[in-house]
Image: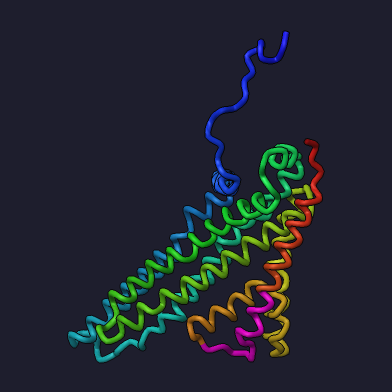
Amino acid sequence: MTIRDLGYKPYEGVRLPPKHNTIVMLRHGLSRAWGSWLVKIAGFLCWVPTIIALFLLGGRWWLTTQVMQGGGGGMEPEPLDGGDFVHSLLGWQVWLFCLLVTLGAGASAISEDLAFRAFQFYFAKPVTPPQYLFGRILAVAIWVFSLTFFPALIVILVIVGTAPEDLRLESLGLLFPALVHSVLISAVMSVGSVAVSALSNSRALTMSAWILLFVVPWVLATIVFEVGEWPWLKLVSIPALLGVVGDALFKVAREDDLSWWYALPILVGFTAGGLWYALQKLRKAEVIT
């Protein structure tokens, strides 16, 4: 009896192009990210700072209206620095919620597949290591971008709506730095967390390593700056570097001498190094075909 007699036939359907593998990996990465309870917490609670910001803007608009109508006792509020306001909101989003997303979805992305030997499944298919890595990183980046840009977008629109007519166009200009900063945050944090996840097959170890990498340098840099007024240690801190670039985008004055041209090359080097390390780790994965 031949194999044809058993009912096996060659596949005659439509074969999807190889680039479709990246879309499949992205879709799988997004669904697996939502399976993390840390991502669920961040997704539901990320709107709390936005709601607080909207209440503050609403109270300020009411106070300004009362002053213009002569019912505020002559106490006119100070002009709103929209760039500083939106930049502060993005900073809260990064620390409170984007860190949770990268912990739940990024810092465990590759380590889980290493632990369960999933590469035997992925790379035995027509999925290449770059396609796998791009799908994993882009899934985390989409979550981080959503938690930063869309809350900032709502706040900016409210700022534009409550601003005087001669300042509305200037306030609308906050959209560009908010978009650029959100893209930068999502790229750095997604690549960094996924690269750290390639360190080991232990999910607890990689998540702890990401927390140490993100938090400890920032704490040390802050202490050194407060005690000795030496700001250069911030160049080894991811959130501090993001803050320096954000200050330049939103034209916020800084208390130290750090400028964006110091921070941006380090962030680019960190992102490129993380991509290179994770890709090399994937290419060394043992696959039996």
Q: Quadrant of the C terminus?
A: top right
Residue under the point 36% across and 69% down: 54
Whether residue 98 is visible here, answered yes or no, is yes
Horizontal side of residue 280 vs 47, given as left or right: right
For the record, the magenta segment spans: 253-267
Q: Residue 231, position in %: x, y?
A: 69, 86
Q: Position of residue 129 (x, y in %)?
A: 70, 50
Quadrant of residue 187 within the rendered picture = bottom right
Q: Residue furthest top?
A: 1
Q: Quadrant of residue 167?
A: bottom left
Position of 98 compared to 199: left or right?
left
> Is residue 5 or residue 20 the one in the foreground?
5
**Residue 252 location, x and y as percent?**
50, 85
Please name the residue shown 68% across and 54% down the image: 130
Q: Is residue 218 visible?
A: no
Q: Position of residue 171 (x, y in %)?
A: 36, 80
Counting labels gives 0
Indicate whether residue 264 is drawn in magenta: yes
Left or right of 187, for residue 289: right
The vertical placement of 137 against 64, above or below, is: above
Image quadrant holding the N terminus, namely: top right
Residue shown at 36% from the left, 88% from the top: 78
Q: Quadrant of residue 162?
A: bottom left
Rendered residue at 71%/85% (across/down): 232
49 or 175: which is nearer to us? 175
Q: How is the image coloured?
A: rainbow
Please check the rendered image and state whether residue 165 is part of the magenta-colored stretch, yes or no: no
